[in-house]
Image: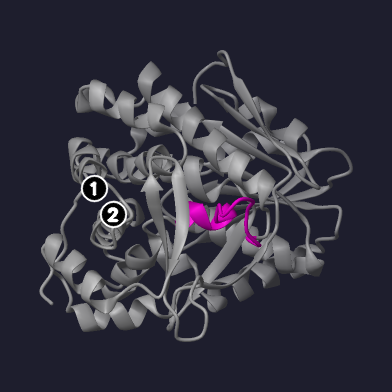
């Protein structure tokens, strides 16, 4: 992590407002985000992501306990969560103590869930180290773990007391991981901020790299999209004037989660989201809701940054069954977030199976 530079502070409004701090070398802001009265801090981090420097920063202020968890989605199980609870219990964690997550989206989801459930809720600060976690998991207060039935089916809403996005951590991120994170960024362009699409389409993909001003602008714009949507609909109860509220953030995720489950999470989340967004655009086009040029723009925008836009790894029947377990479903009724235009999301309840099959065929799948 480098020396501090100019930082951007994005406020997430709501009943328990908090700040998202974005910049290079901003780790020293962490104690301020944790707040007063904290004695013990548990740092939850993946086994493959050393947290020594972060722990050293905290040790001047707190009693610090490091909790290493499995990498990626393997961390998001009840068994791992229970092991974390045992560590907190042995350390005598009270309601005035805090959890810090340091890692990617899976670590953020798990650590947030542990914080939400220990003593019915202790404070948590997220320090995401991947692009995906910065623009998605770290903001909004959704926490969760997976089950055999699907992804994130067990969880709770638990807002952090702060989020620290140190862009310096992206310098060591493998290119494939950075590109995967752009899946959620481009998604935000379609559902809320078309300037994101303009930036992606006018920038050479190689320039979308750690340290580039364009990447920083994309990160900040995507965070603002999520902050605004979350502030208006914290617990996913719906928006005004037909807007799906927080559900809009799940654009493309119904098929994405089905692909992740089918592939046993070997497909990166951002890659699955890109495929899912292209698929649902095809569904909306066939349902007469979305203009053909915007459907085509889905294919080109995601492909431009190096993300997949096709999938043929499972039968339609397998994915259709998995989609029905999606959190947005009601009973046996499948509900998809779709677009009527750029930045005009809506929910399509009970899409025609013929449209679903044709959309899957359009992205390379076998019906």
Q: Which residues are magenta?
A: 236-250
Which residue is found at the position 77% from the left and 62% from the top?
91
Say whether residue 206 is magenta. no
User: The C terminus is located in which quarter?
Assistant: bottom left
Residue placed under numbered mark 2 in the picture:
281
In the rendered structure, the answer to whether residue 356 lies left or right of residue 35 reads left
- The image shows residue 283 at horizontal and vertical percentages of 27, 62
Can residue 211 be seen?
no
Frontmost residue, 56 versus 281: 281
- The image shows residue 341 at horizontal and vertical percentages of 37, 44
**From what the image shows, is residue 263 above or below residue 178?**
below
**From what the image shows, is residue 115 above or below residue 309?**
below
Mark 1 and 2 residues: CB-CB less than 8 Å, in contact?
Answer: yes
For residue 353, which quarter of the picture?
A: bottom left
Which residue is found at the position 51% from the left and 85% from the top?
331
Circle number at residue 62: none
Q: Residue furthest front?
A: 288
Which residue is found at the position 63% from the left and 64% from the top?
113
In the rendered structure, the answer to whether residue 24 lies left or right of residue 181 reads right
Frontmost residue, 57 versus 103: 103
Per the image, label 2 sits on a secondary structure element best described as: helix
Residue placed under numbered mark 1 in the picture:
295
- The image shows residue 67 at horizontal and vertical percentages of 59, 58
* Prevailing SS of the magenta stretch: loop
Can residue 80 be seen?
yes
């Amino acid at each position: 992590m480098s020396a501090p530079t100019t930082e951007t502070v994005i406020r997430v409004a709501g009943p328990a407002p908090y700040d998202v701090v974005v910049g290079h070398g901003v780790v020293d802001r962490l104690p301020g985000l944790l707040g007063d009265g904290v004695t013990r801090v548990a740092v939850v981090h993946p086994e493959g992501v050393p947290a020594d420097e972060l722990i050293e920063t905290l040790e001047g202020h707190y009693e610090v306990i490091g909790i290493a968890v499995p990498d990626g989605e393997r961390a998001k199980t009840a068994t791992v969560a229970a092991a974390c609870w045992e560590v907190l219990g042995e350390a005598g964690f009270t309601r005035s103590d805090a959890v810090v997550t340091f890692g990617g989206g899976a670590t953020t989801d798990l650590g947030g869930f542990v914080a939400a459930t220990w003593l019915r809720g202790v404070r948590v600060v997220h320090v995401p180290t991947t692009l995906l976690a910065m623009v998605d998991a770290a903001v909004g207060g959704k926490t969760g773990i997976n089950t055999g039935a699907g992804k994130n089916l067990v969880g709770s809403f638990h807002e952090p007391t702060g989020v620290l996005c140190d862009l310096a951590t992206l310098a060591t991120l493998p290119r494939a991981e950075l590109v995967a994170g752009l899946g959620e960024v481009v998604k935000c362009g379609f559902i809320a901020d078309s300037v994101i699409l303009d930036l992606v389409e006018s920038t050479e993909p190689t320039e979308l790299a750690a340290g580039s001003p364009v990447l920083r602008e994309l990160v900040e714009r995507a965070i603002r999209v999520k902050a605004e949507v979350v502030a208006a609909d914290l617990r996913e109860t719906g928006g005004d004037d037909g807007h799906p509220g927080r559900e809009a953030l799940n654009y493309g995720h119904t098929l994405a989660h089905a692909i992740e489950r089918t592939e046993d999470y070997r497909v990166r989340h951002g890659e699955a989201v890109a495929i899912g967004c292209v698929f649902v655009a095809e569904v909306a086009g066939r349902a007469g809701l979305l203009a053909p040029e915007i459907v085509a723009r889905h294919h080109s925008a995601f492909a431009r940054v190096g993300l997949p836009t096709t999938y043929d790894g499972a039968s339609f029947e397998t994915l259709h069954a998995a989609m029905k377990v999606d959190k947005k479903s009601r009973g046996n009724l499948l509900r998809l977030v779709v677009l009527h235009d750029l930045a005009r999301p809506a929910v399509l309840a009970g899409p025609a199976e013929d449209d679903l099959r044709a959309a899957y065929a359009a992205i390379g799948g076998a019906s």
